[in-house]
Structure formats: structure tokens, C-alpha cells
């Protein structure tokens, strides 16, 4: 028998945690009480076996082996038996156990969804919108006249127009500053004092409001009117300037 006929199959591990869970499951070890020395020895033997088969091993496998050796070395260090009040030291295996538990939970969940996807494919169905009992029947010959068809078509067109009313776009032209100056001058001619907010009620666009404000400033600049307000953001009062010759 040639060497090429010999085939060895290893479980397909997706990562070092997968390999650790496999070793724990095979040995029927309690995941909360992992014998680090035993697991480390088996883990290193598995890596050597994978290397002997010329399998490419990712760096995370070697990182896990270093972690196991570090935990094992912590157990080998002597403990101080001379002090009674020694602070509680955490078990060096706790971090590893927590990672294994979280990994096993997500692994079981992924296996469940994978099995469900294979066994229960996603199928979306929809019942027919029109019942078979409501099929359209052909019109009897000679019972419908041309005028009836014309009237029916006119009714359909009229209903369609009601559903889609005619839309029109109306563009309003903003007033210029000279027009606003004339507007204020007319107001001041009728009344000695006018309110800016009251004048603003005659307009609805932001452009008109800006033009009205600039016209107010222009009248004050030309000494045609004075403006004041009681407090910030309050109404602006405009008063016409009278010249006594």
C-alpha cells in the first residue's frame, strides 16, 4: 500500500475555541472546572498532529496555546502560606471559561438557524386578489349599443379627471425695496405712527419681510422716519418726521 492511499480526516475546527470545546466534550469535562494541565497537553498534541499533516494553522491557535501555558504556569507558581489575610485571587481559568460559554451559545444558535434554513426554506405565498367566482363574463351580442359604450367611456373619463385634478403653479413676485418705501410712506401719510408688525401682516413671504425691513432702514437713513422698540424682538414703531419750516 502506498502512502498516498492513507487518508486521515480531522474535525473541521473554525477556531481554537472550537477545538477546546471538542476536547471538553470528548473527555466529558465540566466546562466550569477545566483541568488545565490535561487540556493543555491534549491541545498541544492536536496542534502537533495538524502540523505533521502539513495543515496550515492560523496564529490564533498558537495564541490559545500560549494562553493555556500561561494559565498552567500560574498554577505551578508557589502560593504564600505564611500570610493569613490573603486577598481573594480570581481563578485564572475564569476568563477562558467565559469565552467558551459565550462561544458555545452562539455556535448552537448558528447551528439552529442553519438547520432551519435548510429544512424550512423561506417561501412567500399570496392568495389571488380576485376570486374565481368573480370572473368577467362576455357581454351578450346585440344587448349593448354604441351609444351605451360611448356613455360608459365618458363616465370613466370624467371620474379619471376627478381623481387627477388639474394642478397649477402660481409664482408670486416679491416686492422691491422702492415699492416697500412707497408702501410705508403711504401708511405714514395716513397715520403719524405705524407698527412694523402691522404692516408685515399685509405680506406672506420672507422676501417681502426682508424688503419691508430694508425699506424701514432706508426711511430712517433719509430722515423721513424714526424707529424704536421697547425691548429686543419687540414690535418696531415707525413715526413720520415732520419738518417745521
Image: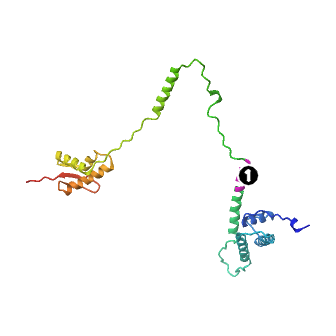
Q: Residue placed at 23% from the left, 55% from the top?
A: 217
Which stretch appears magenta? 110-119
The residue nearer to you, when weighing 160 against 220, is: 160
Compared with 234, 163 (above or below) is above
Q: Is residue 228 visible?
A: no
Query: Residue lying furthest left in this view?
Result: 245
Disc 1 crowd, CA 10 A, few/some/many (<14, 14-19, 20+): few
Compared with 141, 19 (above or below) is below
Q: Residue placed at 22% from the left, 55% from the top?
A: 218
In the rendered structure, the answer to whether residue 136 lies left or right of residue 156 reads: right
Residue 145 locus on image (x, y percent) = 54, 19
The residue nearer to you, when weighing 204 against 108, is: 204
| Residue on which disc 1 sits | 115
Query: Residue lying furthest top in this view?
Result: 142
The residue nearer to you, when weighing 54 against 60, is: 54
Query: Residue lying furthest bottom in this view?
Result: 82
- For residue 125, what is the image quadrant? top right
Q: Is residue 45 magenta?
A: no
Q: Is residue 115 magenta?
A: yes
Residue 59 locus on image (x, y percent) = 70, 71
Amino acid at each position: 500500500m502506498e502512502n498516498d492511499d492513507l487518508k486521515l480526516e480531522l474535525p473541521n475546527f473554525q477556531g481554537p475555541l472550537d477545538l477546546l470545546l471538542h476536547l471538553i466534550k470528548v473527555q466529558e469535562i465540566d466546562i466550569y472546572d477545566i483541568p488545565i494541565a490535561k487540556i493543555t497537553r491534549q491541545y498541544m498534541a492536536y496542534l502537533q498532529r495538524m502540523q505533521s499533516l502539513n495543515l496550515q494553522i492560523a496564529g490564533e491557535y498558537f495564541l490559545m496555546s500560549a494562553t493555556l501555558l500561561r494559565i498552567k504556569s500560574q498554577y505551578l507558581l508557589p502560593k504564600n502560606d505564611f500570610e493569613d489575610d490573603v486577598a481573594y485571587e480570581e481563578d485564572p481559568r475564569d476568563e477562558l471559561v467565559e469565552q467558551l460559554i459565550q462561544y458555545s451559545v452562539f455556535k448552537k444558535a448558528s447551528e439552529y438557524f442553519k438547520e432551519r434554513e435548510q429544512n424550512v426554506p423561506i417561501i412567500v405565498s399570496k392568495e389571488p386578489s380576485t376570486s374565481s367566482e368573480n370572473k368577467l363574463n362576455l357581454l351578450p351580442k346585440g344587448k349593448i349599443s354604441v351609444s351605451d359604450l360611448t356613455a360608459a367611456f365618458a363616465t370613466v373619463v370624467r371620474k379619471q379627471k376627478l381623481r387627477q385634478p388639474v394642478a397649477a403653479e402660481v409664482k408670486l413676485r416679491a416686492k422691491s425695496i422702492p415699492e416697500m418705501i412707497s408702501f410705508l410712506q403711504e401708511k405714514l401719510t395716513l397715520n403719524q405712527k405705524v407698527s412694523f408688525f402691522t404692516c408685515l401682516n399685509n405680506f406672506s413671504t420672507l422676501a417681502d419681510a426682508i424688503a419691508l425691513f430694508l425699506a424701514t432702514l432706508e426711511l430712517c437713513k433719509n430722515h423721513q422716519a424714526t424707529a424704536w422698540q421697547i425691548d429686543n424682538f419687540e414690535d418696531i414703531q415707525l413715526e413720520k418726521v415732520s419738518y417745521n419750516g
